[in-house]
Image (cartoon, grey):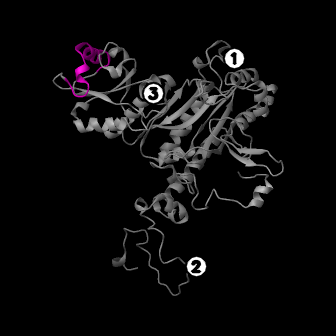
Amino acid sequence: MERSSKNTKIPTGEIEVVAKELEVLGKCKNVLPFEINNDQEVREDLRLEYRFLDLRNEDLHNNILLRSKILKTLRDKMDELGFTEIQTPILANSSPEGARDYLVPSRINPGEFYALPQAPQQFKQLLMVAGFNKYYQIAPCFRDEDPRADRAPGEFYQLDFEMSFATQEDVFQVIEEVVPYTFKKFTNWQVDDGPFVRIPYKEAMEKYGIDKPDLRNPLIIQDVTKVFQNSDFNAFKGKTIKAIVVPNGANNGRKFFDKMGEFATTEEVGAKGLAWVKFEETGEVTGGIAKFITEDIKKQLENEYKVQKNSAIFFIADEFEKAQKIAGLVRIELGNRLDLIEKNVYKFCFIVDFPMYELADDGSIDFSHNPFSMPQGGLEALQTKDPLDILAYQYDLVCNGYEMASGAVRNHNPETMVKAFQIAGYTEEDVKNRFGALYNAFQYGTPPHAGAAPGVDRMIMLIANSQNIREIIAFPKNKKARDLLMRAPSVVAKQQLDDVHIKLK
């Protein structure tokens, strides 16, 4: 090629091809269903219907290549740390693990069903009994849950791992070794090194109103109930009152505060209203409910809650748990609208000390997290404490406001296991029937064990800086859990239903 015809600005700029013969190997229709590299203006359902074309989009294509590299890195790191990769069954038994099961009817055993595993929970514990001291796999998990932007419907993948003779801290050390290493390899953002911050569940709910706090957001929720206990403001009487102080927030105009009020009273958030005031540079309190901020209340807010001049304060008043939830959502919205979120960083924390139990909607006691977790205090705690006061050795890894891993020290003692399930309404016979393999295995000398399961899809989504988990999965389902490419779920032939002894209503 002559020097003058070179174009070094494009990949093929130094190559010249002289065609002597042309053969079309694969014909293409004259009109594509959409322009390949213009995904922002194409309906997502159309892109998913023609996913084989959509995957030609350079950004999406690179996401799938990135996924491949991240999976290899995770496997290499776990191998380096001495873990053994073991596959566990896909056709398993149904067990209560927090979501609806996908059921698979058995042809050979009429009237009986397999369940696709929500997680390899029982299998990995059985592997500990079997003497495989450090297990892992990139495990497919199946849960019949509603889709979200950060949760793929139907199926997802975890880096599932378990260790014998391990404490909570041992599990944390593995995560702190594997996760920052993987993130640093594929991003130029700042990545937290271990040890990560540990935040008890109760503290997380008090300070952030959520158990997956985004630590890039500097705003903190404070309880100011006692400050207003003698207030004349009727909306605050008899309520838990949460406050969010926004430094320099007094600079915002009335429209901003009105818009925040509109957000708080949406059905999704559920507030009855959003009270606010400004602490002006002059020291004057203005706007919103300023007339109810007496001099005594003002001094308390300044001295005990460090409210400075030129700040704004938002107040949420409601029943305790609802006030926490609403304040958490308001905090997130304020962080986004005021552009307070720290840029180009990954901030990690562990949420620890989850309650073992919670009240179900019908008032009964239910597991709040993983039912196979070890209660803090062991069997004695189960026998002597109020169930709602018992904490568990359960933990979540959180990154930038996303739950990225969940795990626990496991309950490996059969007597403790039976008692834990009895409190949640299961008899010993129920435990034997539902978890027979685990119950039986625990009779034969079970080592203490613990583990966790970082979500692979969510990890890749964060590293790719994508806001939509479907953009890092080759063939995802849509917002209604439909595979528009393969047209699943679909109606099947009557003969297929007869084969598995199923009759539709």
Mark sitting on residue 322? 3
Q: How far apart are marks 1 and 3 (CA)?
A: 32 Å
Of residues 129 and 353, the one nearer the viewer is: 353
Q: Which residue is drawn at 23% across and 23% down?
A: 290
**Is 42 placed above or below 208 here?**
below
Of residues 425 and 354, the one nearer the viewer is: 425
Q: Which of marks 1 and 3 is in front?
A: 3
**Residue picked out by circle 1:** 379
Q: Residue at x 48, y 78 (%)?
A: 30
User: Residue 85 appears at what percent x and percent y?
Assistant: 69, 43
Magenta stretch: give its range.
285-306
Q: Which of marks 1 and 3 is nearer the N terminus?
A: 3
In this picture, residue 77 sits left or right of residue 344: right
In this picture, residue 480 sits left or right of residue 498: left
- Image quadrant holding the N terminus, namely bottom left
Residue 321 magenta: no
In this picture, residue 419 sits left or right of residue 343: right
Q: Which residue lies furthest to the front in this view?
A: 505
Disc 2 marks which amino acid?
A: Leu
Cβ–Cβ under 8 Å for marks 1 and 3: no
**Residue picked out by circle 2:** 25
